[in-house]
Amino acid sequence: MAAKPPTGDPVQDAPEVGEVQHAAAGLPAVAHSLRMSARQMGVRRTALTLLRVNQKDGFDCPGCAWPEPDKRHAAEFCENGAKAVAEEATLRRVTPAFFAEHSVADLAERSGYWLGQQGRLTEPMHLAEGADHYTPVSWERAFELIAGELKALSSPDEALFYTSGRTSNEAAFLYQLFAREFGTNNLPDCSNMCHESSGSALTETIGVGKGSVLLEDLYQADLIIVAGQNPGTNHPRMLSALEKAKQGGAKIITVNPLPEAGLERFKNPQTVKGMARGTALTDLFLQIRLGGDQALFRLLNSLILKTPGAVDEEFVAAHTEGYEEFAATAAKTGWEETLTATGLQRAEVEEALRMVLASERTVVCWAMGLTQHKHSVPTIREVVNFLLLRGNIGRPGAGVCPVRGHSNVQGDRTMGIFERPAPAFLDALEREFGFTPPRHHGLDVVRAIRALRDGEAKVFLAMGGNFVAASPDTEVTEAAMRRARLTVHVSTKLNRSHAVTGAHALILPTLGRTERDVQAGGEQFVTVEDSMGMVHASRGRLEPAGPALLSETAIVCRLARAVLGEGSATPWEEFEGDYALIRDRISRVVPGFEEFNARVADPAGFALPHAPRDERRFPTPSGKAHFTDAPVEHPHLPEGRLLLQTLRSHDQYNTTIYGLDDRYRGIRGGRRVVLVHPDDARELGFADGAYADLVGEWKDGVERRAPGFRVVHYPTARGCAAAYYPETNVLVPLDSTADTSNTPASKSVVIRLEPSGS
Ligand SMILES: Nc1nc2c(c(=O)[nH]1)N[C@H]1C(S)=C(S)[C@@H](COP(=O)(O)OP(=O)(O)OC[C@H]3O[C@@H](n4cnc5c(=O)[nH]c(N)nc54)[C@H](O)[C@@H]3O)O[C@H]1N2
Ligand SMILES: Nc1nc2c(c(=O)[nH]1)N[C@H]1C(S)=C(S)[C@@H](COP(=O)(O)OP(=O)(O)OC[C@H]3O[C@@H](n4cnc5c(=O)[nH]c(N)nc54)[C@H](O)[C@@H]3O)O[C@H]1N2
Ligand SMILES: [Mo]
């Protein structure tokens, strides 16, 4: 039973709608995850594998980037972590026989769900120019093919080196080193579509583009605001931290257009009491309109400014600048505009203000609900204003907490996966490796797609991820990818990006986090950095999915040797054999990693320095934290239209679909659903259960259509709709991005509904 993938495809997408749930986790979640895991890997392997997740001698959960508490519970994994592990530790295999049976045209017709369910990739495969099928290729030949194409480019900037966020620190460090020795900063990554807005806003205002709190701070907080995040699904272990914070007396305000089950009530499967009754988490739910957060925080700020004694004047005077200008702008804020932008009642905002003023220690947590709008960067800057006003940065129990997605997305950035590297980082690389890195900026995800579309980029290489499915404007992106000379994917699982290729294409199968990594120098481990800047080791224990797999690190080393040859003084072969040598180099290039090998030997890992958190020092050019006073924006919605957010169901990991249910939202057996407020749906003439096409409206006049969605009457904020990504990426215009960060505005897409089949 364990190894059989589903046969029928296209998978029947026939959503059924039941009750929305009001609590997350608990026994059903544990049972559900064990069932899913056992289906993929059998009962014994399930037990053995799940026991190793997030243990000090085990591997880092490939699910999310939420940190592990220091005293780890015997089962420090969650339902969705278990699914992520099962997806990787599955016993199903994609072999050369599979590719002989399925042409690329056939694969391109399949759903992402079906592709992922086929199992782990086992052999390097090549799709030759003009061929219908991928055929096996040796590793050596694969690297020769890539080297041939890269060397034929008229400039290194015609190559793109994408990274998804599961890549280890060691592999990421070598990958960016290789790209830069080759001669380009074209290192787009999933972060460009994810927390780039957080990085932009935080670097500018507090001087560090990362969160400033540790788990301990959450436990000490008086008030935690969770804005634009659905932890019950995407960071389930965060619920245990919120529960613990509540036990310590914290209050929680949730800001979200949707009532998300996990934030309402949490039944901790790891305690008996939790199982029975559960903890009510949210004290105040602000059901905000999409994109209304900047207006909300601005109003709160103006009200704080009007309250005698509410501003931490000592902190403001000693550590900040721009306060006067900000206060003058904020003074002009009116209730009216805010209530329109947010859809909230005056009494709700007043209640929030009361809680804010009662709190001595406040943390704001956020994720994609804040980062994927046109005005995301000013929104997050406004959150920083909010915290600065009351001195809530750089002391215990307070601070900014952007909750990251992929398990090592933050580490990859720390290792230099960035198209706009800091000059100091390049200086350090130059000193350590004795070459001249390119100084001009490279391309981010959106610009990389344009470059492919316009024929300016010709070779695309991805270290993980599913670029064509995760990117916006699916039709544009797929057409762009098809113009490439060569597309290469280092992957664990089959996905759509393997079926939408350049003139020729390679699939390079790699080890996952859960697997044993043995090199010339013996068994290796890798390191990762979590959402709170904690670095620790991760050791796989399972036998690799196949004997031909190479680790990501080995792939980069062999690729670098094939491409750079004698031209590189870097000891790639030695790095491949012993990852400790890579860590030695990291310790000399990346600040905060001094004595890396020695410190990572501590199973608990170590915290990277964070000047605002540790010393209330703000490493901005002026040495002060910045108040900013951008005008308040919010999405404009024409008559008869809806603002659509594209989000995750409970049974998916980004573009990897685990199943067709979204249990907490009461949806089963299908993903093509659009959640609409009952009054909006009725006004637009759509009964619950009717089918609609979602039609995008954007100023370029191009029609973007996602057909055949079941309308679900759902308690979302008025004027706002929700549907799953990646099915709706076809609706997100390539040019609709956040100012400054250039992140696709995936949470504010203007659409109209048309009856399906009309
Ligand atoms: N199981 C699982 N875990 C995951 C992932 C996964 O796909 N599956 N993905 C990982 C990754 S890469 C990431 S980045 C994170 C994503 O984690 P989340 O950001 O939680 O993911 P989304 O599903 O995009 O949910 C966005 C949330 O923000 C709300 N929201 C949307 N727009 C707005 C807005 O304008 N204002 C406010 N206040 N709220 C808004 C939505 O209603 C929803 O609750 O999760 C990570 N963890
Ligand atoms: N409309 C819309 N679009 C979005 C978003 C949204 O909310 N709405 N969210 C955005 C966000 S936050 C993100 S982070 C991106 C995600 O974009 P990506 O990171 O590119 O996409 P994933 O779906 O996470 O990638 C899944 C693939 O990664 C490969 N993989 C898994 N584990 C490993 C590994 O250990 N090594 C290697 N080499 N490969 C591995 C598998 O082959 C799998 O098929 O999508 C973005 N796109
Ligand atoms: Mo993400």
Image (cartoon, helix red, strand yellow):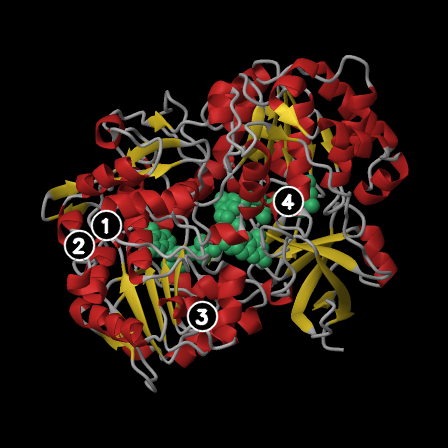
Dot in front, 2 or 3:
2
Q: Earlier in the sequence, mark 1 or mark 3?
A: 3
Residue in the foreground of this view, choosing between 199 and 256: 199
Q: Residue 506: x and y, percent?
A: 30, 71
Foreground mark, 1 or 4, reads: 1
* Dot placed on the residue nearer the N-terminal end, 2 or 1: 1
Could you tell me which secondary element the residue under label 2 belongs to? loop
Say which amino acid is labelled 3. Gly
Dot in front, 4 or 3 = 4
Q: Which residue is mark 1?
A: 434
Dot placed on the residue nearer the N-terminal end, 4 or 3? 3
**Mark in front: 2 vs 4:** 2
Q: Quadrant of residue 114?
A: bottom left
Q: Earlier in the sequence, mark 2 or mark 3?
A: 3
Query: Tag 1: residue type?
Result: Gly
- Callouts 2 and 4 close, C-beta under 8 Å: no
Q: Residues within 10 Å of mark 3 (few under 14, many from 20)?
A: few
Crowding around mark 1 (Cα neighbors within 10 Å: few <14, some 14 to 19, many 20+) is: few
